[in-house]
Image: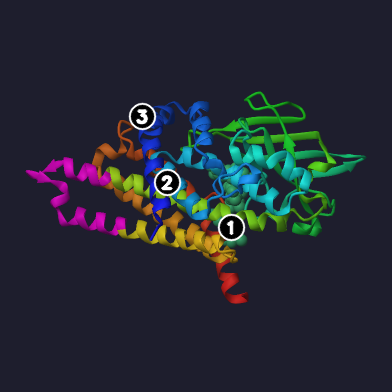
Amino acid sequence: MLSELHEELRRSVRDFVAKEVLPIADVLDREEKDIPDEIIKKMAELGYFGLVFPGESGGVDLDHLALAVVSEELSRGWLSVGSVLTRNLITGMLIQAHGTEEQKRRYLPGIASGELLTAAAFTEPDAGSDTAAIRTRARREGDRYLISGPKTWCTFANRAQILTVLARTDPDPAKRHKGLSLFLVEKESGDAFDPPRIAGEPIPTVGYHGMHCFTLGFQDCAVPAENLIGGTENKGFYQLMVAYESARIQTAARAVGVAQGAFDLALKYSQERQQFGQQICNFQAIRHKLADMATEIQAGRQLTYYAATMKDTGRRCDLEAGMAKLFAADMVERVASEALQIHGGYGYSKEYSIQRYWRDARLFRVFEGTSEIQREVIGKRLIEG
Ligand SMILES: Cc1cc2nc3c(=O)[nH]c(=O)nc-3n(C[C@H](O)[C@H](O)[C@H](O)COP(=O)(O)OP(=O)(O)OC[C@H]3O[C@@H](n4cnc5c(N)ncnc54)[C@H](O)[C@@H]3O)c2cc1C
């Protein structure tokens, strides 16, 4: 059961989505245009970026359960809007848990208030699931580092003012994850990037159209030494673990939201569409689909809220957050596919919103750790403890 505060928060986000997001989501998705700045600004004013950060750091001092509720409701309208929060969550958690006092003072208020947007540059063309294979190099030169190498799939890199970059500080690739560090790389917001220091090219995608993903090229990109997160080299891989707990909870919540949005459309359509002289929801085949979909969504939601509650009570929850993300990622694909099925041929038309949910739903098994990798991580934790 959610508290009245969390229920009230849900109602207010639902209002925001109905007024600000739903009227533009299909149009912008079709035109493959970024979420407008005004929406991000309003989300910042409503405190959505700061839900898990303390008041003294510019946050609103709520909790991961609130983050889950807000992310779910935003994604129920449009996955891209629910996803604006993800990168600030990751970078903010990294700084809060591992940053130096100066990094906390300098960056956390802007990240928690949404005035600063960040992006995560971890993945490389040859290092996706195998993070330890990262080759982008950060070489110390006096009081700065020079970063060189390729990154890919960096979501919203154009809009970000800070790129959180995972790079190799130990030149020996055999050191694997023990030689990686995280850097806060400042840049101007905008599509131009700053080549050759930082070059960026958008990647065409089948969905997730409100935020673009970029391949990035760093060439002797100078970063002040004080922007190494935590100030000590070769800790980056371990630092990411705390942030991943929060990120997986938020991603699971986004999947629940997309699934609920797809379900809402399917239920409504099934009550409107008539075949054989009656509403199609009267057919047992359709009713049972709706029953299975609603049951699966509720299961995903409860796993997510459970992981969030564990996080909020200070317990380790990598296993629970991983399970929530894994289940919700598989679930949303099934639910969105059945929701499209209930729309029949119209579901396959770009005139109907359901195809947007279906395309966005497919992403969850791929990003933030593929489902295959999630199973590996969960399985190993169960066996090894
Ligand atoms: C839209 C989108 C947005 C993204 N945003 C970001 C972002 O902002 N920042 C960022 O850094 N990255 C981002 N990513 C990258 C994402 O995290 C990676 O795509 C993901 O980690 C998988 O890596 P890969 O694509 O290289 O696939 P690969 O690692 O090459 O995997 C290919 C296939 O092999 C399987 N596989 C690989 N290794 C194993 C194994 N050991 N056991 C079993 N199966 C295995 C995988 O599960 C997958 O099915 C994004 C990706 C997408 C598509």
The answer to whether 45 appears left or right of 217 in the picture is: left
Main SS, magenta region, reads helix
- At x 37%, y 49%, the residue is 259
- Closer to the camera, 191 or 97? 97
Q: Is mark 1 on a helix, strand or loop?
A: helix
Asked whether disc 1 touches disc 2, contact meaning CB atoms under 8 Å apart, the reply is: no
Query: If you read the primary sequence from the N terminus, does the residue marked by circle 1 or circle 3 appear first?
Result: 3
- Closer to the camera, 371 or 42? 42
What is the quadrant of the N terminus in the image? bottom left
Tell me if mark 1 has few (under 14), some (14-19) or many (20+) residues whose alpha carbon lies within 10 angstroms of its own. many
Nearest-to-viewer mark from 3 and 2:
2
Q: Residue 245, which numbered label?
A: 1
- At x 35%, y 44%, the residue is 261
Identify the residue position indicated by label 3 in the image: 23
Query: Is 280 in the magenta?
Result: yes
Q: What element carries label 2?
A: helix
Residue 380 appearing in the image: yes
Separation (CA) of disc 3 from disc 2: 21 Å
**Measured along the vertical axis of the image, is residue 147 above or below residue 334?**
above
- How are the residues colored? rainbow
Question: What range is drawn magenta here?
Answer: 266-294
**Measured along the vertical axis of the image, is residue 40 above or below residue 127?**
above
Question: Does the beta carbon at disc 3 come under 8 Å from ligand 1?
Answer: no
Q: Where is residue 219 in the image (x, y as percent from the top left)?
A: 79, 33
What is the quadrant of the C terminus in the image? bottom right
Identify the residue position indicated by label 2 in the image: 9
- Closer to the camera, 296 or 71? 71
Asked whether disc 1 touches disc 3, contact meaning CB atoms under 8 Å apart, the reply is: no
> In the current view of this chain or complex, which residue is farthest to the top?
192
Question: Does the beta carbon at disc 2 come under 8 Å from ligand 1?
Answer: no
Amino acid type of the residue that numbered disc 1 sits on in the rendered structure: Glu
